[in-house]
Image (cartoon, rainbow, N blue to C red):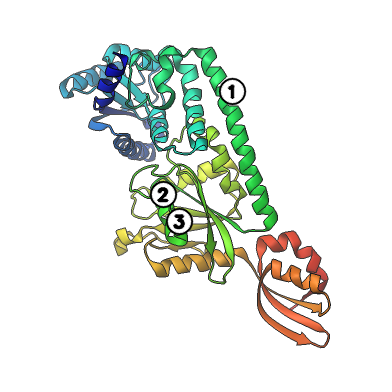
Amino acid sequence: MRMATHEVASKMKERAVLVSVAVTKGGRDAEEEARYSLGELAKLAETAGVEVLETLTQNRESPDHTWFIGKGKVEELKQMIGALGANTAIFDQELSGAQVRNLEAFLDVKIIDRTQLILDIFAQRAKTREGIIQVELAQLSYLLPRLAGQGKNLSRLGGGIGTRGPGETKLETDRRHIRNRISELKRQLGEVVRHRQLHRERRRKSGVYQVALVGYTNAGKSTLLRQLTNADVFVENQLFATLDPTTRILELPSGKEIVITDTVGFIQNLPHDLVAAFRATLEEACEADLILHVVDSSSDMREIQMKVVQEVLEELGAHQKEQITIYNKIDRCGPAEMPLLGGDNAIRMSAYNDEDLEQLKLKIQEHASGGVKRFRIPAGSGDVISYVYRIGDVVAQDTDGDDIVLDVHVNAADFEKMGYMLSEYEQQQ
């Protein structure tokens, strides 16, 4: 009987009304961001398999403590839900447990907030052991302080947003069990983090130049990785199409091999529990020598998206790393829509254009290089000469008496680590 109920519930289509509050004291920019955020919420809902029926917005100086929206808007929302036959209300901001309880009691539908929706999408996308652990940890961390306000969510069997992952066992779980589970997940994640750190340490010791792809979700990071390295990664035109990081070898035009890693996409109001749970994954950006910030040129809100990415990088402590800003998807823009680029650390391109890809590789090579340096080394010092070959690419070699003169396109990171061994042999050009 339980299984039958679960099957029926899992087949019920989520039909939702989206609700948002624009905090008007922030001015026009705040209202514009709120409108963009609501449009993004609709895409998130569609990604989660929800049918969006209507949207409802309210301008307020601050959210209502009891209902989040005003009492009059709650009445309007109830009438809208009844007329449309909706079974879910999704709020664009994070709700407290009390607000969820009050809204569910009055509206008699499932109440989901933006954080729950994003966590649900991550639960669908997680495939590896690390991803599954991180998502469940984020979900339980979000649920624990809200148990008192989960009335109808806890009583619902089956699938649907807000109930994937650990959601199916919420009915039988109390705070003590959740805390125990969180402790166990943190222990398991600690093991995963330890293994990841070992891999990072090996890469660091090997002197391999490391590059990290970061950017707003659906900016084209995975597509770019696939086109650059022929990586077998999942690519889809949807939010959070890929969740688990992928690391591949990229050969530069000089023949030098570097490591490039695709990271999870960022999004406006990325849940703090999710950032905490995925810190081990996101910290790939902190370990990188160079960050490629991929921007969706075709998005009308690219400036907001870029700001969000920089805020997350700052939270991770990676905002001062060397960056190349990649204005991707220019094939979807008209000439007038092309973003204006400034400086040498930006490039506009299409991930599907071979010439653009080559230009990007050259740009990466410039950053990976510390310039050309000349070394005069006694011909019998084979160990010193071997060091030269380890710190870069020899572009010219000549003999002057008993010495060998080498012009080397040095790798900046390698030279920083081992260059002191060659300081007495370096020549001014």
Where the N terminus falls, by quadrant? top left
Q: CA distance from mark 1 to mark 3?
A: 35 Å
Q: Amino acid at mark 1?
A: Ser
Sequence-wise, the earlier of marks 3 and 2 is 3
Question: Label 2: how many residues lie within 10 Å, few (<14), some (14-19) or many (20+)?
Answer: few
Which quadrant would residue 17 be assigned to in this image?
A: top left
Find disc 3 in the rendering and name its residue. Answer: 231
Q: Amino acid at mark 2?
A: Glu
Tell me: 322 left or right of 11: right
SS at circle 2: helix
Q: CA distance from mark 2 to mark 1?
A: 39 Å
Q: Which mark is residue 194?
A: none
> Could you tell me residue 153's position as x and y percent?
36, 17
Question: Label 3: how many residues lie within 10 Å, few (<14), some (14-19) or many (20+)?
Answer: some
Q: Nearer the viewer, mark 1 or mark 3?
A: 3
> Could you tell me residue 271's position as x and y percent?
47, 32
Which quadrant would residue 28 be assigned to in this image?
A: top left
SS at circle 1: helix
Find disc 2 in the rendering and name its residue. Answer: 303
Q: Is residue 13 visible?
A: yes
Q: Which mark is residue 183?
A: 1
- In this view, 301 is above or below 91: below
- The residue that appears at 62% across and 49% down in the rendered structure is 287
Q: Nearer the viewer, mark 2 or mark 1?
A: 1
Tell me: 58 left or right of 201: left
Q: Residue furthest left?
A: 83
- In this view, 288 is above or below 376: above
Viewer-side residue, 305 vs 376: 376
